[in-house]
């Protein structure tokens, strides 16, 4: 509660200063605000990386030592070996890669097709269809989780990759994002392609997708991260250890009577690496946004 009060007071003070400070003062205040925000975001990551190389006793000691007294590299061995010593980490992270990659690929394809149809084809009921798709975003997953599980159970997809992938092949946010992005795509380019004899699949595959790099990259990062971090659904659907994903593997460390915090942090570090690499690889598209079309409209 005290933390929320501090945040509220800081926000009011920030807004008040931004209203009365000169331009140079606003720039300085904005820089301070961004640096402070970055600090708050990076502190948990710094804690994770430093704690992964500490003995468990040092992690829980207060005040916290940000520089380890000695490096416990054995934490990473324990992370790979797991609680049972069977080295299921590789299989679990492979499962996460398969599920997250398949869901990301299907979401990019289906969301871009739907978004393109809603953005560039003006058929009767277009807005109604889009409204109903948006309405599904307002329904919490927890309310449909049990019915969805019963459907998966009746289709005999429990303990299969299909049960982890099929329910999430496309989502409303992906459709919304692609529709909003493709509305900025020049209609003249599409009309010129039709005049040249291109079919609709050719226009979509050779023009729309090729020129939707920033939106596709952003959607792929968000979708992959969402599936990579998913815990509740894999806990319900994947009962076999060979099908468990990396979040359930991390959770297994907390199930022990005496949790090894160092090994748990080491697992978290290893599990974070694929997402960090994905963001680095796609960052230029992710940050680029839709500036490519805004430049073309000027």
Image (cartoon, rainbow, N blue to C red):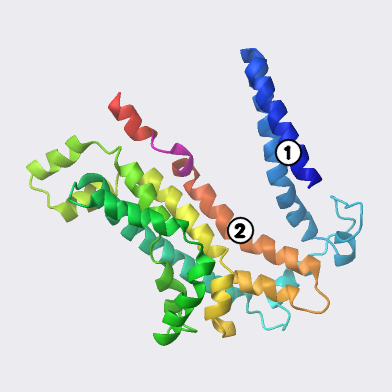
Disc 2, SS: helix
Residue drawn at point x = 68 percent, y = 45 percent:
41
Q: Return the mark for residue 137.
A: none
Give 121 or 28, whichever is nearer the viewer: 121
The residue stretch that appears in magenta: 286-290
Instruction: Judge from the rendering whether residue 119 lies leftward or rightward of residue 59; answer left or right.
Output: left
Assign the C terminus to one quadrant of the image.
Answer: top left
Q: Magenta stretch: residue 143 in it? A: no
Could you tell me residue 6's position as x and y percent? Answer: 77, 38
Q: Is residue 75 left or right of residue 213?
A: right
Q: How far is disc 2 from disc 1 in space, using C-alphas?
A: 31 Å
Q: Nearer the viewer, residue 248 or 58?
A: 248
- Look at the image and tell me whether residue 32 can be seen: no
Query: Residue at image x 48%, y 39%?
Result: 287
Q: Dominant secondary structure of the magenta stretch?
A: helix
Q: Looking at the picture, tell me which residue is in the foreground, 13 or 58.
A: 13
- Residue at 29% x, 47% y is 210
User: Furthest-top residue in view?
Assistant: 22
In the rendered image, residue 63, in percent from the top left (x then y), is placed at 91, 51
Q: Of the two numbered discs 2 and 1 on the same chain, state the one appearing first in sequence.
A: 1
Task: Please name the residue that numbered disc 2 is placed on.
Answer: 273
How many numbered discs, if any? 2
Does the segment drawn in magenta span residue 287?
yes
- Contact (CB < 8 A) between labels 2 and 1? no
């Amino acid at each position: 509660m005290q933390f929320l009060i501090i945040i509220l007071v800081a926000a009011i003070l920030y807004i008040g200063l931004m209203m009365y400070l000169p331009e140079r003062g606003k720039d300085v205040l904005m820089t301070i605000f961004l640096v402070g925000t970055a600090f708050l975001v990076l502190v948990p990551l710094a804690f994770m990386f430093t704690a992964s190389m500490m003995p468990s006793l040092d992690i829980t000691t207060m005040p916290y030592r940000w520089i380890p007294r000695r490096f416990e590299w054995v934490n990473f061995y324990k992370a790979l070996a797991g609680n049972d010593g069977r080295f299921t980490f590789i299989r679990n992270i492979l499962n996460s890669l398969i599920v997250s990659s398949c869901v990301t690929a299907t979401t990019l394809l289906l969301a871009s097709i739907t978004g393109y149809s809603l953005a560039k084809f003006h058929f009767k009921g277009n807005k109604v269809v889009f409204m109903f798709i948006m309405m599904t975003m307002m329904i919490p997953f927890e309310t449909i989780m049990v019915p969805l599980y019963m459907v998966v159970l009746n289709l005999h997809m429990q303990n299969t990759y299909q049960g982890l992938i099929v329910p999430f092949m496309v989502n409303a946010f992906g459709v919304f994002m692609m529709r909003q992005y493709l509305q900025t795509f020049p209609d003249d380019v599409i009309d010129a392609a039709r005049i040249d004899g291109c079919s609709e699949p050719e226009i979509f595959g050779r023009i729309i997708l090729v020129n939707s790099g920033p939106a596709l990259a952003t959607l792929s990062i968000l979708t992959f991260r969402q599936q990579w971090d998913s815990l509740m659904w894999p806990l319900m659907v994947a009962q076999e250890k060979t099908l468990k994903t990396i979040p359930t593997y991390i959770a297994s460390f907390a199930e022990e009577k005496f949790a090894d915090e160092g090994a748990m942090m080491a697992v978290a570090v290893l599990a974070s690496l694929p997402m960090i690499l994905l963001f680095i690889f796609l960052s230029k598209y992710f940050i680029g946004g839709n500036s490519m079309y805004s430049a073309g409209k000027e």
